[in-house]
Image (spheres, grey):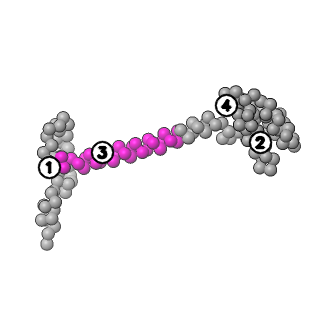
Amino acid sequence: MPSVERLESAVRALPGVKEVTANRAAEQLRVVFVPGVTGAHEISDAVAGTGLKLDLSGADPLERERTAEAREIRALTRRVAVAGAAAMVAMVLSLPLMHAEGGQGDLLSPAMMPLPSALRGTLPALYESTSQRSATSCC
């Protein structure tokens, strides 16, 4: 087993390495380095030169950053999809209100004309006024 000092000095000798801390009890090696100057594989080779083996799983900071960015993009995409679906539902449910007020002055009215009649046939409760509902549900 190589000593901690020998391991640290072997890794510290690499260009771009700023800080090295080895912990034999925890079997950990913490290295602060400049990614453009040296890489994880060079550090692994230096550790192998001392007779130890280095596990590089999760060692690449750029890969961790890419993974975090991909996770964030997926989360934001889900949020946009949910917001878009909610906006579509709100738009469709507001059609009876626009139709009741006689909203015939906008550019989309001719394109949306079939929708209110289809909704009226499918969901007539949306088109009932509150006075009609209270009169039908009375006594």
**Gap in angstroms between the C-alphas marked 2 and 4:** 18 Å
Determine which residue is flagged by label 3: 88
Confirm whether the magenta stretch covers residue 57: no
* Label 3: element kind: helix
Q: Quadrant of residue 85?
A: top left
**Which quarter of the figure is the N terminus placed in?**
top right
Determine which residue is flagged by label 2: 21
Q: Neighbour class for label 1 at 10 Å: few (<14), some, many (≥20)?
A: few
Q: Position of residue 60 (x, y in %)?
A: 66, 36
What label sits on residue 35 in the rendered view? 4
Q: Nearer the viewer, mark 2 or mark 3?
A: 2
Q: In the visual, does 48 lie left or right of 117?
A: right
- Up-down: is 118 above or below 37? below
Q: In the visual, does 85 lie left or right of 121?
A: right
Residue type at tag 2: Thr
Residue type at tag 1: Ala
**Gap in angstroms between the C-alphas marked 3 and 1:** 19 Å
* Mark closest to the chain's N terminus, 2 or 3: 2
Q: Position of residue 118 (x, y in %)?
A: 19, 47
Determine which residue is flagged by label 1: 100
Q: Residue at x 31, y 45 (%)?
A: 87
Residue 78 in sight from this viewpoint: yes
- Up-down: is 139 above or below 28? below
